[in-house]
């Protein structure tokens, strides 16, 4: 029989913030490819919600309460996973937040909060799994970047700074640990329909589409928002041996946004 180079059989995957949304879709794809799925969320309630959602898909996932910005809690969670399940083969730094506030109205504390979750935390979680990866001479780290790793827009200064930084952290991990057969790549989703982007898609009082919704459709050659499942194939590719010589790359999964100047208004 031909070997399946996309198989994740026998691998342990940790996907942060994966009770729902993009993280959940990626974790589900990993489980379907054969991996054991571990995830975390901020509260027991959210973890239980996630566990029930995985169980409904026939997946036995392992859920942990952990704030990814808390280095001690992250180290504890990774140690617990190593003891209970095995060393982490695949890490997806997915947990993230956004604050849409015009820069001149944003406090430094609000800015720091976004940087803490979206940039410092991927550093913290990667640092926690890297020693075992180095020792075992294998590992995959996938950082969930953004259109804002390349582009700016009004109100998202902190998010863009964090996601731009995450792109460079990705390249640096690849540079620093590539010799240990560790691949660190990013996925840059386009505009994906999840709770994070729900305010941008809200139907207006008169029943019309939100102006931002129309704006995104005009900016996306695919003329639709992405679904979390659009990220499944790229995420499996970057976690599998099919991508063993792909390192420090950001794979944009955006329906063509970054290639397109946008539709001319009628
Ligand atoms: P989401 O629906 O808001 O889900 C984010 C998840 O991260 C939630 O489960 C959330 O938990 C968790 N989280 C937040 N802060 C955390 C912390 N400190 N510790 C642990 N977990 C934490 O977001 P999403 O749209 O699925 O996005 C997932 C990732 O993709 C993010 O990094 C986001 O920036 C990125 N992204 C999203 C889009 C998009 O269009 N949706 C596009 C590009 C990139 P709680 O529910 O407990 O808050
Ligand atoms: C926004 C959005 C974005 C997306 C995504 C794009 O307000 O512009 O929330 O930043 O979530 O990251 O790739």
Image (spheres, rainbow, N blue to C red):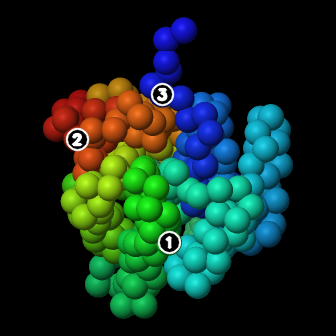
Q: What residue is at 49 percent from the left and 18 percent from the top?
A: 3
Distance between mark 1 and mark 2 Cα atoms: 33 Å
Q: Quadrant of the N terminus?
A: top right
Q: On residue 258, which mark appears?
A: 2
- Res. 67 in view: no
In the image, residue 89 above or below residue 134 = above
Res. 22 visible in picture = yes
Which one is in front, 259 or 118? 118
Asked if ligand 1 lies within 8 A of label 3, the reply is no
Give the total number of marks visible in the rendering: 3
**207 displayed left or right of 120:** right
At x 61% / y 49%, what residue is drawn? 12
Q: Which mark is residue 104?
A: none
Q: Where does ligand 1 appear, by image quarter?
A: bottom right
Which numbered marker is on residue 128? 1
Residue in the foreground of this view, choosing between 256 and 42 = 42
């Amino acid at each position: 029989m031909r070997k399946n180079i996309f198989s994740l059989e026998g691998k342990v995957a940790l996907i942060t913030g994966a009770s729902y949304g993009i993280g959940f879709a990626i974790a589900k794809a990993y489980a379907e490819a054969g991996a054991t799925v571990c995830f975390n969320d901020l509260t027991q309630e959210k973890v239980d919600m996630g566990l029930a959602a995985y169980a409904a898909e026939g997946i036995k996932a392992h859920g942990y309460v952990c704030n990814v910005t808390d280095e001690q809690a992250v180290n504890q969670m990774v140690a617990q996973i190593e003891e209970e399940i095995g060393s982490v083969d695949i890490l997806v730094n997915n947990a993230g937040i956004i604050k849409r506030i015009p820069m001149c109205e944003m406090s430094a504390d609000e800015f720091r909060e976004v940087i803490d979750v979206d940039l410092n935390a991927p550093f913290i979680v990667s640092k926690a799994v890297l020693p075992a990866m180095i020792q075992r001479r294998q590992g995959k780290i996938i950082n969930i970047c953004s259109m804002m790793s390349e582009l700016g827009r009004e109100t998202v200064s902190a998010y863009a700074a964090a996601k731009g930084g995450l792109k460079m952290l990705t390249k640096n991990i690849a540079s620093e640990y590539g010799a240990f057969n560790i691949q660190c790549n990013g996925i840059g989703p386009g505009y994906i329909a999840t709770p994070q982007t729900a305010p941008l898609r809200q139907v207006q009082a008169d029943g019309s589409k939100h102006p931002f919704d129309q704006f995104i459709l005009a900016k996306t050659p695919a003329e639709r928002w992405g679904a979390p499942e659009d990220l499944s194939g790229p995420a499996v590719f970057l976690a599998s041996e099919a991508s063993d010589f792909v390192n420090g790359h950001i794979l944009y999964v955006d329906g063509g946004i970054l290639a397109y100047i946008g539709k001319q208004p009628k």
